[in-house]
Image: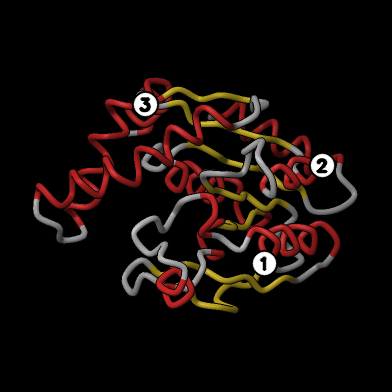
Amino acid sequence: MEALLARIRSLAAGAGGRVLVAVAGAPGAGKSTLAARLVKDLGPEAALVPMDGYHLDNAILDARGRRFEKGSPDTFDVAGFAAMLRRLRSEDEVIIPVFDRTIDLSRGSARVVGPEARIAVVEGNYLLLRDPPWDGLAELWDLTVFLDVSETELERRLVARWLHHGLDPAAARHRAEANDLPNARTVVARSVPADLVLRADELAGQSHKDN
């Protein structure tokens, strides 16, 4: 963790503008946790930018018959997401949407990334996907990090996530197996190599030390 933080700080010190760090991985890999930890440890010069703010609205997904597949690569506004990332590279202040899991919808203009934030830690499943239109993001990253977690562990985490959201055990397993795990396999199989790969056991060991 300290080596990663040092690398990010070094990039920011040598950059003329805002640095974009991509934290990618399958659903349930721990991207949000790692990204939030990085932002906390980096301090006021860092801001968290989640990809999930660019989920297509449920009304659009319903019209397209894609509501159950929400979270798949084609259920995001990739062009809007890319445009926002380019603004982060060139503009001092950018206002971004944030996904609210309690209402299962994105809230527009929900977070300000101000000029003090010279590092944007961007987290999401498909940041390194080699398939269009996601492949157009590759040129925007200054550093890429990928979280490597076994499928068995991902399945355990994803079922637990849906149980936490109130689904019964059968429904939670169905949701994980029918949607989340296929998306996870896409991330693992179709992502380009990252600058840095972190394994689940490494993160667990770091967490144990921190506690």
**What distance separates the C-alpha of mark 2 from that of mark 3?**
28 Å
| Residue toward you, 78 or 203 | 78
* Residue carrying label 2: 13
At label 2, counting other C-alpha atoms closer than 10 Å, the crowd grade (few under 14, some 14-19, many 20 or more) is few
194 left or right, relative to 15 = left
Question: What's under tag 1, amino acid-wise?
Answer: Val
Say what secondary structure mark 2 lies in: helix
Q: Which mark is residue 113?
A: 1
Q: Secondary structure at mark 1?
A: strand
Which of marks 2 and 1 precedes in the sequence? 2
Residue located beneath label 3 in the image: 209
Mark pair 1, 2: CA separation: 18 Å
Contact, CB < 8 Å: mark 1 with mark 2?
no
The residue depicted at 28 percent of the width and 28 percent of the height is 153
Q: Amino acid at mark 2?
A: Ala
CA gap, disc 3 and disc 1: 31 Å
Report whether 155 appears left or right of 149. left
Residue 44 x/y as whole percent: 63, 58
Q: Earlier in the sequence, mark 2 or mark 3?
A: 2
Query: On the rendered image, what quadrant is the C terminus found in?
Result: top left
Local crowd size for mark 3, using a 10 Å CA cut-off: few (<14), some (14–19), many (≥20):
few
Note whether 106 is above or below 144 in the view shown. below
Number of other residues with Cα within 10 Å of mark 1, as a class: few under 14, some 14 to 19, many 20 or more: many
Which of labels 3 and 1 is toward the front? 1
Sequence-first disc among 3 and 1: 1
